[in-house]
Amino acid sequence: MNQQMIAKALEQVRKTNPLVHNITNVVVTNFTANGLLALGASPVMAYAKQEVEDMARIAGALVLNIGTLNETEVEAMKLAGKAANGHGVPVIFDPVGAGATPYRTLTARSIMEEVNVSVLRGNAAEVAQVVGHHWEIKGVDAGEGNGNVTQLAIEAARQLGTVVAVTGKTDIISDGTTTYACQNGEAILTRVTGTGCLLTSVIGAFAAVLNNPLEAAVAAIVTYGVAAELAAKESADQGPGSFQIALLNKLAQVTGEDVVRLGRVELL
Amino acid sequence: MNQQMIAKALEQVRKTNPLVHNITNVVVTNFTANGLLALGASPVMAYAKQEVEDMARIAGALVLNIGTLNETEVEAMKLAGKAANGHGVPVIFDPVGAGATPYRTLTARSIMEEVNVSVLRGNAAEVAQVVGHHWEIKGVDAGEGNGNVTQLAIEAARQLGTVVAVTGKTDIISDGTTTYACQNGEAILTRVTGTGCLLTSVIGAFAAVLNNPLEAAVAAIVTYGVAAELAAKESADQGPGSFQIALLNKLAQVTGEDVVRLGRVELL
Amino acid sequence: MNQQMIAKALEQVRKTNPLVHNITNVVVTNFTANGLLALGASPVMAYAKQEVEDMARIAGALVLNIGTLNETEVEAMKLAGKAANGHGVPVIFDPVGAGATPYRTLTARSIMEEVNVSVLRGNAAEVAQVVGHHWEIKGVDAGEGNGNVTQLAIEAARQLGTVVAVTGKTDIISDGTTTYACQNGEAILTRVTGTGCLLTSVIGAFAAVLNNPLEAAVAAIVTYGVAAELAAKESADQGPGSFQIALLNKLAQVTGEDVVRLGRVELL
């Protein structure tokens, strides 16, 4: 996976407008839908157990996010996940706040057990909790703990048998064998809620057009990071409100040329 | 209904600040509330079966939207709808994603059967599904299928015995006898989530101050389309994030004079 | 409490990034999380009965808001509230729309009875309903009724045995003995949904770093009002969409010096 291939994948997303089915938290639904629309994907949110299987089957990707989980929603996530699995629809999982409470940690693990997840994306603390390592966590915005993030991503990928994307200052994406490091992104992303959740959904959009989950995660993370950098430039020092809006603008405007010029990804 | 009458209706909305009770989807709640507030209406979201009847009774209009429907919410919608019916409060219905899953289609139809709806607003695919015609649909953002939209609106209005507003490039509003076509609006509306849902709620605001649901729908659609055009001009090529914010600004600032000058509506 | 002490409290919020656990309404979740993040606090939304006690215990403050209440959520609020009480975590309560329906009024009162609330924040109509006085109300955005707001705040504080903040043109904060009046803020706050709800959560952020709920409420209200004034200046006459974004920007940028220079608070 290199910048040229990512640029091509971005073009495919915009050409095919993949339907991305999100079962996500109530904090980020609007921002997630707008981010996917801006990028060129077609978002749908559907939660009822009466329809999640039907929706997941016709989607290009299914994104599960436990940010404001409850019993009913978790049940719907598993139904949707299994339906997606049965129809070759990639499932992307964001274990928001795993480790903050036992309920989140156990739910995250049970989803990983019952659903065949193509890509797990979280910060280091969340990913560590899913695989059972100890890592410092505070609420849902934790992330910079101690420990070797690259090693965590590789071990988690091997243990879980899936692609793992650990995002932070440097983003590490691994399938246990092949591992990439991405350096794009901006610190101000941490001052806007849902930027991680939206990234997970953007991975869904790329997974819908690429057959390779590892490459989809890398392509999404680089594209998103480049858009964030352009947004930070546009919104300058105006603050997180303006950055949020600029990020939506730039998800619509970022080009393959921007990705080739600004993308910073390397195979480790 | 002409531009002058629409301008007068807009003035009435701003003078009376009608309470619009929304039972709507989790993606658009914030945008809907802000859009109604900007326009000059007074939004309230209330979902619990213990209070929806009380709230609907004191509202100027009730707006039902199945974008992220579930069993409990649908039950609340029907309770609220019947309470509104019993007190002469107009009910506006948005069958988001009807056709995307059987559950949505059947729920949309059952709401139309059990509640006396004053205005049904959807894109062509959704409206067609509610009346049982075949129309192409993809997720919840579908809309431009093949078929004569004007004919669909008229037939649906006759079959359902209500005002039907089919929105798209051209918006068609019909009560089965009288039919209007509106040409306002901007393509970028399709790049921002919830712009259709907000329009449905804006119809509620106008229905609260006009006794005629057909005229309320026309007035809302023209006013909203003009505001969108002003917003597109203000936000120029900045992108969908900026357009979303500009639309809220312009819903607050659009004047009767703007409507008279820019409104494009004709009786068919 | 004076401007210098408020400036110092703001510094403490930014230094300690307190975790604020919100059980709030679906309309304002995104705006609330972004406002808290902008200010320097660490927001978390968690609603499931399986985790609210665990989350409340590790939080710096718990914020309860009944804007879109339902049975399950109210149960979770009480569980979380009692857990917070048991661990010395201050609870801030926003009785959104109390008086609009009997269900809201009764729920607001039952929360006040079952949970030891540190600060109750609402408009005059809502606070009056919680203590059982008659006050005019329309939907959830009411507020400017007739009656002496200062007297209401003092009486409510005495009757409820808690700090009461009645916000409106002038904000009155009282513990029944000591009473402050704040004059900061902007009229345009009423044109953006959730500005009151976010303020309640901001009180939570200050309550997490100050041991005194009365002073926390005053500090939050003055800081927020000053940020709103700076935001109104930045967004000028652009409209409520731009003001909303500017408010997030200014919550991130407002300094202790701004508070000292612009804060208008007096001990009554």
Image: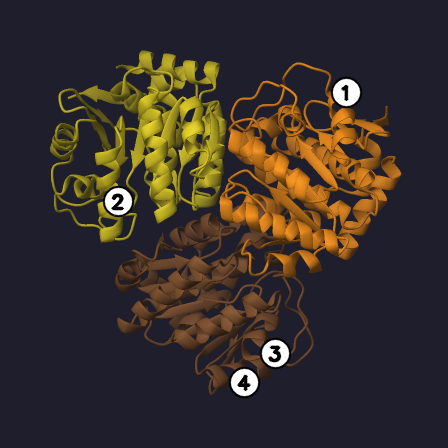
Chain colours: A brown, B yellow, C orange
Q: CA distance from mark 2 to mark 3?
A: 47 Å
Residue C177 location (% of width, % of height): 86, 29
Say which residue label 2 marks.
Answer: B107
Q: Is residue C177 left or right of residue C153?
A: right
Q: Which residue is mark 1?
A: C151
Which mark identifies residue A149?
Answer: 3
Q: Quadrant of residue C190?
A: top right
Residues at badges 3 and 1 in contact (C-beta under 8 Å)?
Answer: no
* Three-letter code for the amino acid on which mark 1 is drawn: Gln
Q: Chain of mark 2?
A: B
The amino acid type found where label 3 is placed reads: Val
Give the quadrant of the N terminus of chain B: top left
Q: Given the image, on which type of amino acid does mark 2 rest?
A: Thr
Q: Separation of disc 4 and disc 1 at Cα?
A: 63 Å
> Regarding mark 2 in the picture, which secondary structure is present there?
helix
Tag 2 and tag 3, C-beta contact below 8 Å: no
The label number, if any, that marks residue A155 in the structure image: 4
The quarter holding residue A14 reads bottom left
Residue C24 location, x and y as percent?
Answer: 57, 45
Q: Are marks 1 and 2 on the same chain?
A: no
Crowd around label 4: few <14 · some 14–19 · many ≥20 (10 Å): some
Say which element carries label 4: helix
Give x and y (percent) for residue A166: 55, 73
